[in-house]
Amino acid sequence: MNPLELREIIRTGLLSFPVTPFDAQDEFSKSAFQSHLGWLSQYPIAGLIVAGAMGEMFSLTPQEIVEVVRATKEVAGDAPVIAGCGYGTRMACELAREIEAAGGDGILLLPHYLIGAPQQGIADRIRAVCNSTNMAVIVYNRGEACVSVEALEQLAAECPNLIGFKDGAGDIDVVRRVTLTLGDRLSYMGGMPTHELYAQAYRGAGMPTYSSATFNFVPETALKFHKAFLAGDDATCEGLLRDFYYPFAKIRDRKPGYAIAAVKAGVALRGFETGPVRSPLTGLTGEEIEMLQQLIKDHK
């Protein structure tokens, strides 16, 4: 898919952030993954971001990420497939090329590993990855890889396939500066954990859409929120925040990593095989699973 075409497709639509299921031997379970994607495919989305943070990219090998992309392409139909990509610069460039060869339409560039870096180094990494592939590149602004407005503006001028900015840092001032400075040059999406909690504030900063983790297990609720969000129907958004999203956040906030583990548990409660989260994450307790089951009973 042409990067500029992908930019327009994802500009306002809801993006799905599928979990990655594992089998009893802790291997990627292609059949379980495709079964879950098949169920989600009946609902309208702008694209799939696979093997990203929600897909436990940090625990996947590069080869597993490529396997996830191939498995997605087999069942995704017309939905664009965007894959998580990251680690060190050379690893990210190599992985981007492998994702492209596997049929990916774009990559979400996650932060580099461990160490802080100056803006020049962060920009050099983004530039190198953009130059390594013909696919669309979306920068994930979070952690040690937060990019300045000035660096992003220069990269957008140099790299035609840099088409998106996803924010997971939560600095609304930076988000507004980015959207105001870059305008229509990029697509913008929210990427905070359970982003529905932040969506209305981000909308005011010029960010018109986001990726939804809860779409994994309550797709109708996620789409209802997104539809109301796009329409400026704050009353509906606030009702869903009160009745579902804030109670979900109370479960999610019990332990670090539950932003992923709780979603994976939700998928399992909807009848799909997921296997456990990989270490260093841990799964929900029996009590917490019961709490989640009660919460989703009235939400689909």
Image: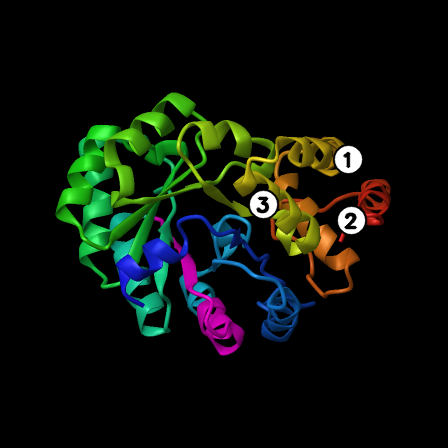
Do the residues bearing badges 2 and 1 touch, measured as CB atoms within 8 Å? yes
Report the disc number at residue 32.
Answer: none
Magenta span: 67-87
Side of 230 where 149 appears, left or right: left
Residue 88 visible in image: yes
- The front one of 87 and 141 is 141
Which residue type does callout 2 highlight? His
Label 2 – label 3 distance at C-alpha: 15 Å
User: Residue 26 is drawn in which quadrant?
Assistant: bottom right
Does 73 appear in magenta? yes
Does 245 appear in magenta? no
| Point 73% across, 65% down: residue | 272
Of marks 1 and 3, the one in the foreground: 3
Instruction: Name the residue carrying label 3.
Output: 226
User: How busy is the neighbourhood of tag 2: few (under 14 within 10 Å), some, or many (20 plus)?
Assistant: some
User: How busy is the neighbourhood of tag 1: few (under 14 within 10 Å), some, or many (20 plus)?
Assistant: some
Label 2 – label 1 distance at C-alpha: 10 Å
Q: Quadrant of the N terminus?
A: bottom left
Report the disc number at residue 243.
Answer: 1
